[in-house]
Amino acid sequence: MEAIQPIQELVSAIFLLLLIALGVYLISRRSNLPYTVMLVVVGIGINFASSNVPALEQMGNTLQISPDLILFVFLPTLIFESSYNLDASQLRRNSVQILTLAIPGLLLSTALIGLIIWKALDIDLMAALLLGALLSATDPIAVISLFRQADRPDRF
């Protein structure tokens, strides 16, 4: 009987999180705010509340997900799905605009993050720029999700 208890807690926690995600989805449809942004805000709120509410803290301890599972199972699956549904002709047609925005944007973001970290912390400039390069890389799944939800011209 003791072995069943953790499974019930895990299923209950996942069910509760799915209900919260459904509520966030319904609110995002009515408010025209991006679903992914609202999920991040609600996740930060749940994390803050879990430090103050013992039941939420216990649920957080029940839902420990391995970083390897995310890195080697979930992320490749999501990236594959996005690339599989990508229209290559539109990518070729818009490649100049994409590269014109992506390259300077990445360099500027890397430099700003690196310089802020270098000034704020006692870190070598090259290490701070390396950290800036790691942090400024855009999450492709979030970008694709936002573009699918946003009102945008068909050429994107």
Image (tube, grey):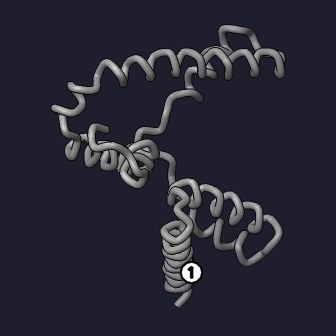
Residues packed near mark 1 inside 10 Å, few (<14), some (14 to 19) or many (20 plus): some
Q: Nearer the viewer, residue 86 or 46?
A: 86
Q: What x and y, as percent, mark residue 3? A: 51, 82
**Count of numbered marks:** 1
Name the foreground residue: 60 vs 43: 43
Q: Is residue 9 above or below residue 150?
A: below
Q: Left or right: where does residue 54 sit relative to residue 108?
A: right
Residue at 59% across, 17% down: 108
Residue at the spot x=72%, y=69% of the render?
A: 57
Q: Position of residue 27 (x, y in %)?
A: 55, 72
Quarter holding residue 41:
bottom right
Q: Can residue 10 be seen in this snapshot?
A: no
Visible in this render: residue 82? yes
Tell me the kind of residue under disc 1. Answer: Glu
Placement of 96 over or under 32, stated as above or below: above
Percent x, y for residue 56? 70, 73
Does residue 128 appear to the left or right of 103 in the view shown?
A: right
- Using residue 12 as the reference point, say whether residue 125 is left or right of it: right
Name the one closer to the observer, 3 or 17: 17
Q: Position of residue 114 (x, y in %)?
A: 68, 18
Residue displayed at 52% across by 21% down: 105
User: Residue at coordinates 19% horizontally, 39% vertically from top-left?
Assistant: 87
Local secondary structure at mark 1: helix
Q: Which residue lies most toward the front here?
A: 153
Q: Give the farthest residue toward the bottom.
A: 1
Q: Is residue 69 left or right of residue 127?
A: left
Residues 1 and 93: in front is: 93
Report which residue position mark 1 lands on.
9
Q: Which image quarter is the C terminus in?
A: top left
